[in-house]
Image: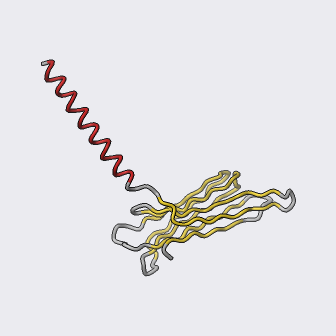
């Protein structure tokens, strides 16, 4: 009986290891790769201060993600991501607005049938006293 318990525990540990290794390998296949980036500076003429802002467009196997980042909290950050076919027909679109944050993002899937997808990312940063900045990022356009 003791031998069966030891063997059962051993087999479970092997099975647990192989499952976690398989999950890790599939997660690595879905890592986002930055495919375009755009930066700018928001300025405040009265205080002569500035804020750095950046828009990234990333791609994984089946999704594009538009990520918007600022060096200081913004009153609002609007992010929009659109995916298109190779013939520039809209597949999917998503937008998101966040308030009082340094980060924002939106994502758009494109599906497995589209072998050469295209994407546009839009990023808008607003803060009281500063000029509004809008950035565009593109992939395969």
Q: Nearer the viewer, residue 48 or 75?
A: 48
Residue 36's image quarter? bottom right
Residue 4's image quarter? top left
In the rendered structure, the answer to whether residue 68 lies left or right of residue 33 reads: right
Instruction: Tell me the colour scheme of the image.
Output: secondary structure
Q: Could you tell me how many numbered marks the image carries?
A: 0
In the rendered structure, the answer to whether residue 109 lies left or right of residue 97 reads: left
Query: Which quarter of the rendering shows the N terminus?
Result: top left
In the rendered structure, the answer to whether residue 10 lies left or right of residue 76 reads: left
Residue 131 appears at what percent x and percent y? 76, 64
Q: Residue at x 67, y 59 (%)?
A: 53
Residue 8 appears at what percent x and percent y? 18, 28
Q: Nearer the viewer, residue 82 or 34?
A: 34
**Residue occupying the far top of the picture:** 2
Q: Nearer the viewer, residue 52 or 97?
A: 52
**Residue occupying the far right of the picture:** 46
Q: Residue at x 59, y 67 (%)?
A: 122
Q: Residue at x 57, y 69 (%)?
A: 137
Residue 38 appears at what percent x and percent y? 62, 66
Q: Residue at x 48, y 60 (%)?
A: 33
Residue 46's image quarter? bottom right
Q: Nearer the viewer, residue 3 or 64?
A: 3
């Amino acid at each position: 009986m003791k031998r069966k318990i030891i063997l059962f525990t051993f087999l479970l540990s092997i099975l647990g290891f192989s499952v976690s290794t398989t999950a890790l390998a599939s997660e690595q296949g879905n890592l986002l790769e930055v495919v375009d980036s755009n930066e700018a500076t928001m300025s405040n003429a009265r205080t002569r201060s500035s804020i750095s802002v950046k828009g990234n467009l990333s791609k994984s196997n089946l999704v594009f993600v538009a990520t918007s980042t600022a060096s200081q909290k913004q009153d609002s950050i609007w992010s929009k991501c659109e995916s298109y076919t190779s013939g520039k027909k809209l597949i999917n679109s998503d937008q998101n607005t966040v308030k009082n944050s340094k980060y924002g993002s939106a994502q758009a899937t494109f599906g497995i049938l589209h072998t050469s997808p295209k994407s546009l990312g839009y990023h808008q940063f607003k803060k009281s006293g500063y000029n509004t900045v809008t950035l565009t990022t593109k992939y395969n356009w």
